[in-house]
């Protein structure tokens, strides 16, 4: 059973590390107006899905909702329109209007996402630590008998 817990926690940590890296990329590119694809940087978001664990024996009769694993389904690009800013001195400004198309990134949203992913990562790491402690205690108690 401990192996399943470690699998779930490690998958959660991996998924949230990707979320943290994606948010960091969004923040780092908040002022990128020129990309290889053309136009301003488009914010990215990680889509997570819950997947059923392969459970056999007595465990399959327990609450299956508590035996869900997390998986990264995709990293999607936000296709909402870019922010339009008047900045005639910017090298990427439209010569006639002085408008620059900026990335569609809201720093407050990104910080909320970063805090959420960080807390989820920390929670999964704590599950690993607690499970290690339980396994160690169980081994120590079982060696007495």
Image (spheres, grey):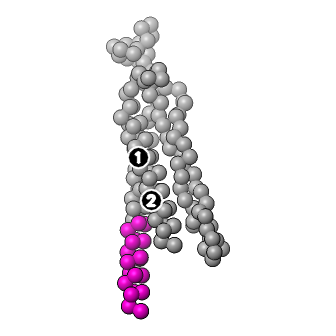
Read off the residue under disc 2.
10
| Tag 2 and tag 1, C-beta contact below 8 Å | no
Q: Residue at x 50, y 44 (%)?
A: 46
Q: Residue at x 42, y 86 (%)?
A: 142
Which of the 4 quarters of the picture holds residue 132? bottom left
Magenta-drawn segment = 127-145
**x, y (%) of residue 20?**
40, 46
**x, y (%) of residue 43?**
47, 34
Magenta: main secondary structure equals helix
Is residue 134 covered in magenta?
yes
Q: Is residue 62 visible?
A: no
Q: Nearer the viewer, residue 73 or 41?
A: 73
Which structural element holds mark 2? helix
Q: Residue at x 44, y 46 (%)?
A: 19
The label nearer to you, 2 versus 1, is 2
**x, y (%) of residue 67?**
57, 65
In primary-sequence order, the first of circles 2 and 1 is 2
Q: Is residue 10 left or right of residue 90?
A: right
Which structural element holds mark 1? helix
Residue 20's disc number: 1
> Exactly how many numbered labels are in the figure?
2
Outermost residue, bottom direction? 145
Q: Residue at x 45, y 59 (%)?
A: 10
Outermost residue, top direction? 96
Crowd class of label 2 (few under 14; some 14 to 19; many from 20; radius 10 Å): some
31 in relation to 130, above or below: above
**x, y (%) of residue 96?**
44, 7
What is the distance, in whole Å, between disc 2 and disc 1 at their CAs? 15 Å
């Amino acid at each position: 059973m401990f192996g399943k817990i470690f699998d779930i926690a490690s998958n959660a940590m991996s998924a949230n590390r990707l979320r943290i890296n994606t948010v960091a990329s969004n923040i780092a590119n908040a002022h990128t107006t020129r990309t290889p694809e053309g136009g301003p940087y488009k914010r990215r978001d990680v889509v997570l899905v819950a997947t059923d664990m392969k459970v056999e024996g007595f465990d399959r009769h327990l609450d299956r909702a508590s035996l869900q694993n997390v998986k990264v389904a995709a990293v999607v690009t936000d296709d909402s329109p870019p922010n339009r800013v008047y900045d005639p001195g910017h090298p990427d400004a439209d010569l006639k209007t002085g408008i620059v198309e900026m990335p569609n990134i809201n720093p407050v949203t990104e910080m909320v996402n970063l805090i959420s992913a960080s807390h989820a990562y920390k929670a999964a790491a704590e599950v690993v630590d607690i499970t290690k402690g339980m396994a160690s205690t169980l081994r120590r108690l079982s060696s007495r008998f």
